[in-house]
Image (cartoon, rainbow, N blue to C red):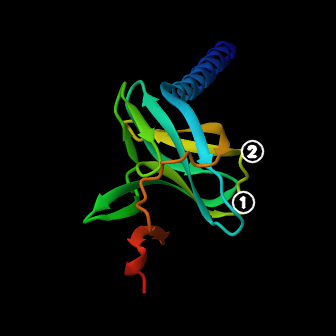
């Protein structure tokens, strides 16, 4: 009887070690996915008092292919992955419901007037020459999600960026010419 208990205890220990090794390996795989997406030159656009939204821009390169499926920051109530595109001479902005595809080995640029992270319901103005924390959420081909924490510098928008035409303004996710608003 003593031998059976020793054998059972040994098997239990082996099972626990295997479970621990599996958990560590799974954690390492998630870390590897997060590390397989390289983030370069992140920056957020500075805001003024009362402004409730801003964009965050960067270049993303995924070694294995992934999707940018979400974003968040404690400075905002909502973070989303957005796209701006020209339709019938009107620039429209909308969230990407399935996220932004990051093909393996190709750099995808998030920039004013194109793909970007939109931070909305800002809790206060974002001052130039400060930094904000931003969390990006990536998903691999199997849907496994990982998070990457960033410290993003806040900059004034460089002259000539934005993709907005003169005399245009943003209202609830859609750009309209001033004459179109009534």
Q: Secondary structure at mark 2?
A: loop
In the foreground, 71 or 57: 57
Task: Identify the residue at horizontal 36%, vertical 62% (top origin).
Answer: 91
Work out which quarter of the rendered image holds the C terminus and state it.
bottom left
State which quadrant residue 54 falls in. Answer: bottom right
Q: Position of residue 119 (x, y in %)?
A: 58, 57
Looking at the image, residue 89 lies above or below residue 153: below
Q: Quadrant of the N terminus?
A: top right
Q: For residue 114, which numbered disc appears in the image?
A: none
Residue 130: mark in rendering: 2
Residues 112 and 3: in front is: 112
* The residue positioned farthest toward the left in the image shown: 88
User: Which residue is farthest bottom?
Assistant: 182
**Image point 40% across, 61% down: which residue?**
165
Mark 2 or mark 1: name the one nearer the start of the chain.
1
Image height of 149 relative to 20, above or below: below
SS of the residue under disc 1:
loop
Say if 78 sits above or below 109 in the image: below
User: Percent position (x, y) of residue 178?
Assistant: 43, 76
Q: Neighbour class for label 1 at 10 Å: few (<14), some, many (≥20)?
A: some
Residue at the disc numbered 1: 125
Q: Position of residue 125 (x, y in %)?
A: 72, 60
The answer to which of 169 and 99 lies nearer the viewer is: 169
Can you name the residue that lies furthest to the top here? Answer: 3
């Amino acid at each position: 009887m003593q031998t059976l208990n020793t054998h059972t205890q040994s098997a239990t220990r082996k099972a626990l070690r295997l479970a621990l090794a599996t958990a560590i390996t799974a954690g390492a795989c998630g870390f590897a996915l997060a590390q397989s997406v390289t983030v370069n030159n992140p920056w957020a656009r500075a805001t003024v008092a009362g402004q409730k939204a801003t964009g965050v821009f960067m270049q993303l390169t995924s070694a294995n292919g992934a999707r940018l499926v979400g974003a968040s920051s404690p400075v905002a109530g909502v973070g989303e992955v957005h796209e701006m595109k020209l339709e019938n001479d009107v620039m429209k902005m909308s969230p990407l419901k399935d996220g932004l595809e990051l093909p393996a080995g190709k750099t995808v640029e998030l920039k004013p007037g194109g793909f970007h992270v939109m931070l909305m319901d800002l809790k206060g103005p974002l001052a130039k020459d400060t930094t904000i924390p931003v969390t990006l959420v990536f998903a691999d081909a199997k849907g496994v999600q990982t998070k990457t924490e960033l410290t993003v510098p806040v900059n004034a928008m460089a002259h000539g960026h934005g993709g907005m035409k003169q005399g245009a303004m943003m209202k609830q996710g859609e750009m309209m010419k001033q004459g179109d608003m009534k």
